[in-house]
Amino acid sequence: MLKSGLWFQPAERAAAHVICAFGAMVLALIAGGFQARTRGQSTELKTIRVLNYENARPDAAVFLAFDDSHAYLATPDGLFRTDRSLRPEAALDPLGLADRQINNLYVHRNVLYVLLQSEETTGGRATSHSFLRSEDRGQTFIPMDQGLEECYSNICHFLTPTQAAFREERIFLNAGGGLNLLVSEDRGASWRALSGSLNAQACYSPAFELIGRQVVMGGECPLDRAYLRRGTLRADLLGWEPGGDLRETDRPDLENRNVMVIEGRPNSPVVFAGAEGVVLKSDDFGQSFRPVLEYPISGGEKYPYPHRMLLPAHSVEEVLIGGFDKAVGRPYLARTRDDGTSWEDLSRLAGWVEQGDICFIVADPYGQVLIGINDDARRTVTIAELPSSSVRPRPGRPRFPVRTPIRVPRSAN
């Protein structure tokens, strides 16, 4: 045997064979370990539960929220409660609102809040409430839209909200759309306008985020003119500090790219905003923004509408955005792991859906990231986990993905 120009004797050759075999085994173990780690880093969704729904309401969405013992699901067929592990065998208890469009769902201090599309009442006071709370896990609901009723001629309705925020005893709503940002200090008994008015506006509902006393708000108003503004609230959060009212941020012209979602990273000056075909980032609490992901307004193969966003608590550089790709009508999902420097398009994970969107991206009580994938054609919602090695395993999760559709029971309002 020749090695480094030297001849080995027979005994030495035998020893060399053993050494080489041992070395090959070590190398194989190292390579195998590397391959396992590489496979472990591959991105695959783990299906938790699949729900069928019957109502094909065109603007209906799906939302998921958790309290200390239950999960709440808003679907086109109404509001439901289940075990917060979302086990496929756990019952779905109907909580009503089957004939209403649910616009959002929150749990704050273990109280459930439901945002609804208000409907007009002719010939009398408004009866179709748009903001409700439940203090008994969805058994009963208390209206919180006193002061949000608007009447013209003989038609009345409550201002419709799509987003809420909760800070201590203050509740913030974008009810009425346009430039409206409203606040209540008495659990919805009365409201005041921080921006806009206590009347409905002829523009899209704004997105907003509160970072301490900083407010970042965006949308498109007037129509076809996107905006992204920032202001500073007083210490009591009931008005603007002197000179702190909402003003345009330093950013590129957004043209008609409606701002759809804004999220700030806790205890950080970083803020992300998702608009039609673009994601912007701020490093100074929203004073200035720059694009970190952008698609051309026309002529491109993709044009995503990112209306869902999550900055996971377990990572200081990860951001997930989701929505739908207007160019093809399919779900759109993307992620950055370096705070917006580079992005990975994960839309393939929902590749079986030909018409639909990512309806929610949330962290469950165990820190796992859950994705909701709405399939319009099949009328199904797939709740799936985007695995992460940095959070605790979800308890009660089946060993293999559960793909058996679970029929959502119909309920009466």
Image: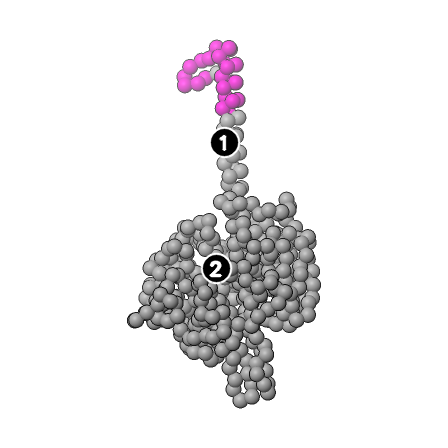
Displayed quadrant of residue 267: bottom left
At horizontal 52% and vertical 37% (from top left) the residue drawn is: 35
Residue 118 in the image: x percent, y percent? 56, 76
Percent position (x, y) of residue 18? 52, 18
Label 1 element class: helix
Return the disc, 1 or 2, that comes first in the chain's sequence.
1
Question: Disc 1 designates what residue?
Answer: 30
Can residue 203 be found in the magenta stretch? no
Q: Which mark is residue 309?
A: 2
Q: Is residue 259 left or right of residue 100?
A: left
**Residue at the spot x=52%, y=66% of the render?**
326
Residue displayed at 40% across by 53% down: 339
Write down the region rendered in magenta. 2-24
Amino acid tagged 1: Ile
Label 1 crowd bin: few (<14), some (14–19), many (20+), radius 10 Å: few
Q: Is residue 200 visible?
A: yes
Location of residue 237 (image quadrant): bottom left
Rendered location of residue 124, percent (x, y) = 58, 85
